[in-house]
Amino acid sequence: MSADWIDREKALRSSGGGTPLLQSEHAAVNARYPGTTLECCCECGDATGRAGKDDDSFYTEDGDGPYCWDCWQQLMLVEEA
């Protein structure tokens, strides 16, 4: 059996990549591989609830991230001090 687009997307995301997906495509990938397309915080590991680096995710100017809202707020407090 050859890999379909879902298997290829899973492999791509497992290696740190990924492609933009429609919501229906996210649902299809996550139905087979739960949590695959969730963006998780680099600090605590929780889902960020965000859409990715080129959309509305929290990253530092150096490119570190993504961060969830709580970790982002803590990071901003540390940087202000």
Image (cartoon, helix red, strand yellow):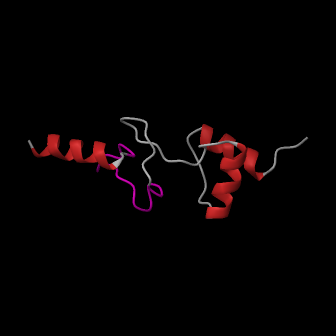
- Residue furthest to the right in view is 1
Q: Position of residue 72 (x, y in %)?
A: 28, 47
Q: Residue shown at 65%/48% (left/top)?
A: 30
Magenta stretch containing residue 55, yes or no?
A: yes
Residue stretch rendered in magenta on the structure: 50-66
Left or right of 2? Residue 70 is left
The prevailing secondary structure element of the residues shown in magenta is: loop
Residue 74's spot in the image, x, y percent?
A: 22, 42
Q: Which residue occupies 81% across, 49% down?
A: 4
Asked which quadrant contains residue 44, the reply is top left
Residue for point 54% across, 47% down: 38
Please tell me which residue is depicted at 40% across the width and 38% down the height of the picture. 42
Judge whether residue 72 is colored magenta. no
In the rendering, at what x and y percent does residue 64 appear? 35, 43
**Rendering coords of residue 21 (x, y %):** 62, 60
Q: Quadrant of residue 56?
A: bottom left
Which residue occupies the foreground of this view, 43 or 2? 43
Asked whether, in this view, residue 54 is left or right of residue 9, the answer is left
Front one among 8 and 50: 50
Comparing 44 with 80, the one in front is 44
